[in-house]
Image (spheres, rainbow, N blue to C red):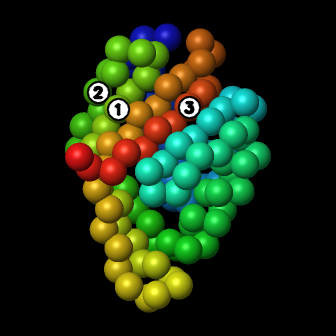
Amino acid sequence: MTTNLFIERAKKYVTLSNDHDLARIKCLFADDATYHSDYFGTYHGSDAIHTMMTSFFARFPDAYWEVPEYRDNGQNGIEFAFVMTGTDVSTGEPVTRHGLERIYFTSTGLIQHIAVYKPA
């Protein structure tokens, strides 16, 4: 796959995340995908990732990611800085999180791994 296709797939993932479309997000992941977030931990397998995302969107029902630019990370993937905003329903407080996300793809274009890092 080419960098442009990786960027298109990463943009689709962010768009579906902003739409909170969990069914279509799940289809983007390889069955054995992994997900690590400095904010929420590590998950193995698309079912575990889907369960985590379901819980995340229940906690932040208005979550939204701003992504100004997508870059090739040179390792079959894309990286981007983001700002996530939303309301934590457990506290009623607004939340703003900055971070760096890296998405790695299989040769067929499915998401193999996502890594989310807090800013340095």
Relative image position of residue 110 (x, y in whole percent)? 61, 26
Work out whether 5 lies above or below 20.
above
On the picture, is 13 further left or further right than 51?
left
Q: Residue at x 32, y 21 (%)?
A: 72
Q: In terms of depth relative to the viewer, which is nearer, 100 or 111?
A: 100
Q: Residue at x 43, y 29 (%)?
A: 8
Q: Which residue is mark 3?
A: 113
- Number of labels in the image equals 3
Q: Residue at x 51, y 83 (%)?
A: 89
Give the residue type at disc 3: His
The residue carrying pointer 2 sits among few (fewer than 14), some (14 to 19) or many (20 or more) residues within 10 Å by Cα, namely: some
> Residue flagged by tag 2: what amino acid is it?
Arg
Q: What residue is disc 1 on?
A: 79
- The three-letter amino acid code for the residue at tag 1 is Glu
1 relative to 10, above or below: above
Side (left or right) of 96 relative to 31: left
Residue 28 in view here? no
Q: Earlier in the sequence, mark 3 or mark 1?
A: 1
x and y, in percent, of residue 48 in the image: 72, 48
Using the numbered discs, state the Cα–Cα distance from disc 3 to disc 1 in whole angstroms.
Answer: 12 Å
Secondary element under disc 1, as helix, strand or loop, is strand
- Secondary structure, mark 2, is strand
Q: Which of the labelled discs sits on residue 67, or is there none?
A: none
- Asked if the residue at tag 2 contacts the one at tag 1, i.e. Cβ–Cβ closer than 8 Å, the answer is yes
Q: Residue at x 50, y 72 (%)?
A: 60
Pick the residue in front: 95 or 18: 95
Give the CA distance from mark 3 to mark 2. 16 Å
Dot 3 or dot 2: first in sequence order is 2
State the SS at label 3.
strand
* Residue wearing tag 2: 71
Q: Is there a contact, CB below 8 Å, between mark 3 and mark 2? A: no
